[in-house]
Image (cartoon, rainbow, N blue to C red):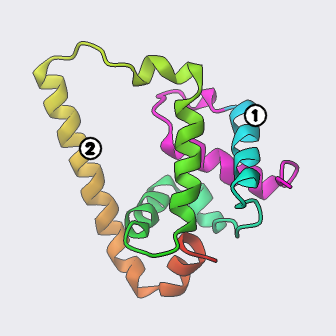
Amino acid sequence: MARTNDTDAHAEALCLLRYVTVFDDNTLVGDDLINRYLLALDYHGLASAPLLDPILRRSPLLLGAVDAVSHLLPDNILRKKLLIAAAIVECNPRSAEALLPRERSRIIIFFSLVGLTLRILLKWIIALPLFLIPSFLKRNARAR
């Protein structure tokens, strides 16, 4: 059964949904999305999976670093949770405006690509020292 009343599970759901969201306004991630996410975890057998450390729920930058590293780790619970969160956000009608294509100039596209590239580099700069703490990675990325 989903842990819909569990404060920590709710905080993790909010964190992961905000992490994968494309909204500039994080207030669009409300209780309806959180409840759908928790029910989806239950449906996929992940409701009993260990929760992320509280530090990751408070720090999107650190979560991004663990996410970057998690692509390299087997049996990855974090990736499964993020895929569920992404599916929940994509299926939300409020995300259509942000996800649908729109006209953009080449300059805007170029600077968007530069910004995304810098974000990826920053995630990996923060992620590399995490390899020195394998217990932290195991607990948060492949804890099963």
- Please name the residue that numbered disc 2 is placed on: 116
Residue 45, position as x, y percentages in the image:
72, 60
Gap between marks 2 and 1 measured at Cα = 29 Å
Considering only order in the chain, which callout, 1 or 2, is on the residue closer to the N terminus? 1
Q: Is residue 128 left or right of residue 141?
A: left
State which quarter of the image contains the N terminus.
bottom right
Q: Along the line of sight, which residue is nearer the eye, 140 or 115?
A: 140
* Secondary structure under the numbered disc 1 in the rendered image: helix
Question: What type is the residue that disc 2 sits on?
Answer: Leu
- Please name the residue that numbered disc 1 is placed on: 31
Q: Along the line of sight, which residue is nearer the eye, 105 or 72?
A: 72
The residue sitting at 32% across, 19% down in the picture is 101
Q: Along the line of sight, which residue is nearer the eye, 108 or 4?
A: 4
Q: Is residue 53 above or below residue 131?
A: above
Q: Is residue 89 left or right of residue 2?
A: left
Q: Along the line of sight, which residue is nearer the eye, 133 or 142?
A: 142
2 is within the stretch colored magenta: yes
Q: Is residue 25 above or below residue 20?
A: above
**Outermost top residue:** 103
Mark 2 closeness class: few <14, some 14–19, many ≥20 residues within 10 Å? few
Tell me, for residue 80, which label it has, or none: none
Range of residues picked out in magenta: 1-29
Residue 111, position as x, y percentages in the image:
17, 33
The residue sitting at 38% across, 63% down in the picture is 68
Residue 85 in which image quadrant: top right
The residue sitting at 45% across, 66% down in the picture is 66
Question: What type is the residue that disc 1 sits on?
Answer: Asp
